[in-house]
Amino acid sequence: MANKFSAPRGTADILPEETLLWQDLEAKTRELMRVYGYREIRTPIFEETALFARSLGQSSDVVQKQMLNLAKNVSPGQESQEDGGLSLRPEGTASIVRSYIENSLDKKEGLSKLYYVGPMFRGERPQKGRLRQFHQIGVEVIGPNSFHPYLDAEVIALSVRILEQFGIKDFELRINSLGSNEDKRNFSTVLRERLKKDMGKLCPECQSRFERNVFRVLDCKNKECKAVVAKLDLGDAHLSKESKEYFGKVREALGSLKIRHTVSPQLVRGLDYYTHTVFEISHSELGSQDALGAGGRYNDLVQELGGSEGVGGIGFALGMERVLLAQPAAELKQSIDCFVVSLDAAGEKKASSEAFKFIEELRAKAVTADTSYAQGSMKSQMRAADKSGARYVIIIGEDELRDGKYTLKNMHSGDQEKLSFSEVLARLLKK
Ligand code: HAM
């Protein structure tokens, strides 16, 4: 027997019984996005590797360890700008900012309120809630006038409303401010000073992070590093007066929307582009991969990627697999309007051929109709009808062909009646 194939490690098939939940998640989210004034953007699932290195940071874990690069396929003499390599997108922000700049959206609209839904790729060690191909719902608001505390609060509120809409309650929203780029530099100096005496206790990776990107020490999952970090009393001394005021206004605005949150000075996020407000939403029941979503402001990214000065942005992404894991159990079923049972006389095909045409006519009127082509007994066809969840069964046999009327059975009440095609249709269209 030939070897069977399996889905690649860290990927998952989403089977029909689950896709209904995915569709529900997408449909309700899209509706909420519409209500909040966000429009969908779709960008390619791969980009130049350099885009991610420049945005997320060369020293970020994602760029250092998790990029899934495409094999190069360039003939000699045909080298192009892409020769630095292409990678599957590990997240959406970099691509969306790239697209924003490339398509001069700043010239076309004051504030671009964008959302996206789709797969992301990270070469991580797979475990529950952590995949190599996973899906995000994300938003990015970019524009020259986007540096407004109400916008930070709107974006955070939207992420919370999405979760609430799916009945997810026990989540924790933590927020922090990294301040401006200059504040971030102060922050890293303060951090280095505080961590210096405990250098020996940090894992070898954090010891190298200490110089390269000291913020990463705060995200380290190593037990000893976590213990060192837990003892740090960070506060907000690194923030300028303006940054503190801004953050205060964001918190006030969240309060006015009754969005519960805690301030967590340890929260710095693993990607380099963040400035000012950052946030993360976690859910204790998800185990070690407890982040449902996260986001923050990135006031310098547009300029760093070659766009205009003074164009800031803020956004978030929710992990769809994790939202579905955290959602209270829900069962959705795709049912049909009617199932057609046909019973041919011995040696004939009249009933089944009539049924075949009949179903197509029903479908043309947008009635969902189906049948089982495996021509079995009445009993086996009724079993299939039951399984399909159809509201009605239509029976076509010798009697029905002779009378030119079909038997319509209401599967809920068990009532049966003989009707013409137009009467059947009227009954089926009456919801
Ligand atoms: P992130 O924190 O890297 O942020 O990812 C956001 C969410 O995606 C996580 O909280 C998690 O729910 C989900 N996620 C990440 N990696 C995996 C994985 N391997 N398997 C399953 N789910 C995962 C970003 O991606 C930023 N782009 C968010 C953002 C948008 N910031 C500003 N705008």
Image (spheres, grey):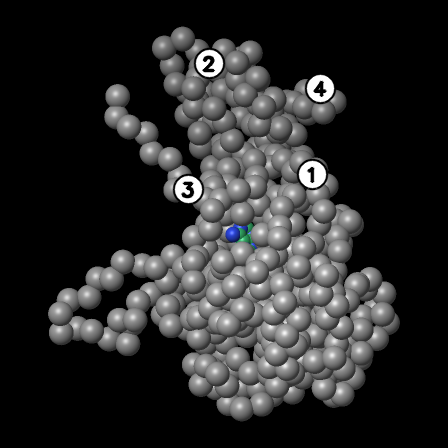
**Residue designated by label 4:** 414
Left or right of 357 on screen, residue 297: right
Q: What x and y, as percent, mark residue 147?
A: 67, 84
As measured in the structure, the alpha-carbon distance from the residue carrying label 2 to the one carrying label 3 is 41 Å
What residue do we see at 61% from left, 66% from top?
A: 269
Q: Closer to the N terminus: mark 2 or mark 3? A: 3
How dense is the environment of label 2, judged by Cα within 10 Å: few (below 14), some, or many (20 and up)? Answer: some
**Residue designated by label 3:** 9
Q: Relative to residue 279, is residue 406 depicted above or below?
A: above
Q: As shown in the figure, which amino acid type bears the numbered disc 3?
A: Arg
**Residue designated by label 1:** 330
User: SS of the residue at dot 4?
Assistant: loop
Ligand 1 resides in the quarter of the picture at: bottom right
**Which of 237/420 is in front?**
237
As measured in the structure, the alpha-carbon distance from the residue carrying label 3 to the one carrying label 1 is 27 Å
Q: What x and y, as percent, mark residue 283?
A: 71, 50
**Residue designated by label 2:** 376
Q: Closer to the N terminus: mark 4 or mark 3? A: 3
Q: Closer to the N terminus: mark 1 or mark 2? A: 1
